[in-house]
Amino acid sequence: MAFPRPFNPSSSAAQDKELRAAFERAQALHRLHGKSYYFATQLFPRPLRQATYAIYAFVRVPDEIVDNSPQSTPQERQLISLKLNQWRKDWQRAYQEKKSADPVLHVAALTYHAYKVPPQTAEDFIDAMIQDLQQSRYRDFEDLKGYMWGSACVVGVMMSHIIGFKDERTLEPAAKLGYAMQLTNFLRDIDEDFQLRNRIYMPQDELSQFGLSDEDIVQRHFSPNFRAFMRFQGQRTHRLYEEANEGIPLLDKQGRGAVLAASTLYRAILDKLEAQNWNPFAGRAKTSLPEKMWRVGRALGTSRMVWRG
């Protein structure tokens, strides 16, 4: 497949139409569910945009299965587990055959092969989705990192292979960007994750260090201690963004701008949280489209040296 154009020149017009529709389906999922990331993705050249749509859709489908399915009983959780395992089987077959009747799996398989993305990354992601059914609390940060590796860091590894790199050291900061983005989501969504899904991703030992417990989240009890806890988590996440951004020059030039934009936009959510006094119960922290454009423009304008060399 000549991937710079998503259609095989030797295929029939009907096949081209089907492939175009499959990529459009993946793009629609990305546009609907990943607004900040979708905005950043527009800085990629077209082939990388399409590959990113395929990757995003591939991880979004099982994520939606977990997050938007009832799971209050063992039977409901078992049903979700069956769906995830079926998704894994369908994916493995799609990867092996380089095709699938499912449009998302079809373009994901083509993308994985075209860019030589390690297949284990897909397995690790699905494992993390299954873990979400089995674990709703995390003992400490190392415990949480184990989950975040599969739920977010492997996406950074996937994207690094799509963008391109020459040095394996690129993958460490790519993983750190995954940690930073996932932690940002966790901090923003503390209230929603518990109220809708009975999940608390904050490390239990760190809650205790600040004189807090699950009950503070359950009762939406925002206190000076909770503010200090959130500030501590925010500072850790800012550091991860800084360390992740150091890896941007290791990526091929064609992808550096989009990665910096994604990092900038997700990091802006931390600024929004800080602006609301680090209170996650005060409303969902988010940026407007004009603010996204301003932040990305400023980041790109002041970081030109990143793309030299």
Image (spheres, grey):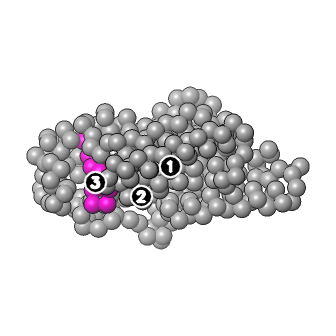
Of 234 and 245, which appears nearest the observer? 234
**Residue at 31 percent of width and 35 percent of height:** 143
Residue 281: percent from left, percent from top: 24, 64
Sequence-first disc among 2 and 1: 2
**Distance from the alpha carbon under mark 2 to that under mark 3:** 13 Å
Q: State the residue position of label 2.
A: 69
**Distance from the alpha carbon under mark 2 to that under mark 1:** 11 Å
- Three-letter residue code for mark 1: Lys
Tag 2 and tag 1, C-beta contact below 8 Å: yes
Q: Which mark is residue 198?
A: 3
**Residue at 51 percent of width and 42 percent of height:** 85
Sequence-first disc among 3 and 1: 1
Please name which of the two marks, 2 or 3, marks the residue nearer to the observer: 2
Residue 113: percent from left, percent from top: 70, 38
**Residue at 70 percent of width and 48 percent of height:** 100
Q: State the residue position of label 1.
A: 83
- Three-letter residue code for mark 2: Ser
Q: Which mark is residue 263?
A: none
Q: Give the vertical position of 35 relative to 243 (above or below).
A: below
Q: Mark 2: few, some, or many residues within 10 Å (few <14, many ≥20)? A: few
Of 303 and 188, which appears nearest the observer? 188
